Image (cartoon, helix red, strand yellow):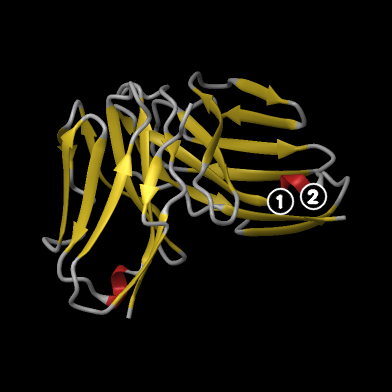
Amino acid sequence: DAGVIQSPRHEVTEMGQEVTLRCKPISGHNSLFWYRQTMMRGLELLIYFNNNVPIDDSGMPEDRFSAKMPNASFSTLKIQPSEPRDSAVYFCASSRELAGTDTQYFGPGTRLTVL
Amino acid sequence: TQLLEQSPQFLSIQEGENLTVYCNSSSVFSSLQWYRQEPGEGPVLLVTVVTGGEVKKLKRLTFQFGDARKDSSLHITAAQPGDTGLYLCAGEEYGNKLVFGAGTILRVKS
């Protein structure tokens, strides 16, 4: 069974450019999470969805960040315009439901470098 | 947002030694999870503890949830090089919304 799929695995872009990160959750999972990991701040939850509906976006750092989940098998995280401080590894995770004991399965991450 | 503090931040030990990693908070969590992350990969869930005082064992790893559900520990017996990685604790605020600790980098030398 395929795990969470993220693309691209690596992205290098210049400041001011638009960046789109993609995620395909595990089939049958109803909840999807976007995280950001940096050395300084660790792993932070940005936004999460349940049944394709955004539930909590309080972790989204600025209006430059937006996330969508048009259907149960696809989500995007967009940064426009990108800044050097956005450089981080971005993870997508999915779980069956929003119960606290449901396992979150993480994708391999997208390493973003903004020059 | 509740905060979780992990200690130590970094641990380098010899194969065969025992170690304990701590995860502390002033807040109560519904449940607490431990993850292990290897370079270039996402975190992988090791265990979830739910009940205060709960102890779970996973081979050489023992996890304990504090009685007040504010803290947890991970004890590894006879560490092996394959245990090397970043260990993260995560507390559930509500509805599977997790807050992560900063992590403990473990290096086991052979």
Report the residue marked by disc 2.
Answer: B81
Badge 1 sits on which subunit? B
Residue A26, image x, y percentages: 38, 30
Spot occupied by residue B21 in the image (x, y as percentages of width and height): 65, 45
Residue located 33% across and 21% down the image: A28
Kindly identify which residue carries mark 1: B84
> Where residue A92 sits: x, y (%)?
35, 44
Image coords of residue A69 (percent x, y): 18, 39
Q: Residue at x 23, y 29 (%)?
A: A72
Marks 2,1: beta carbons within 8 A? yes
* Left or right placement of residue A4 versus residue B106 in this view: left
Label 2 is found on which chain of the structure?
B
User: Which of the labelled discs sits on residue A104, or is there none?
Assistant: none
From where the camera sits, is residue A60 visible? no
Quadrant in the picture for the C terminus of chain A:
bottom left
Identify residue type, mark 2.
Pro
The answer to which of B40 and B103 lies nearer the viewer is B40
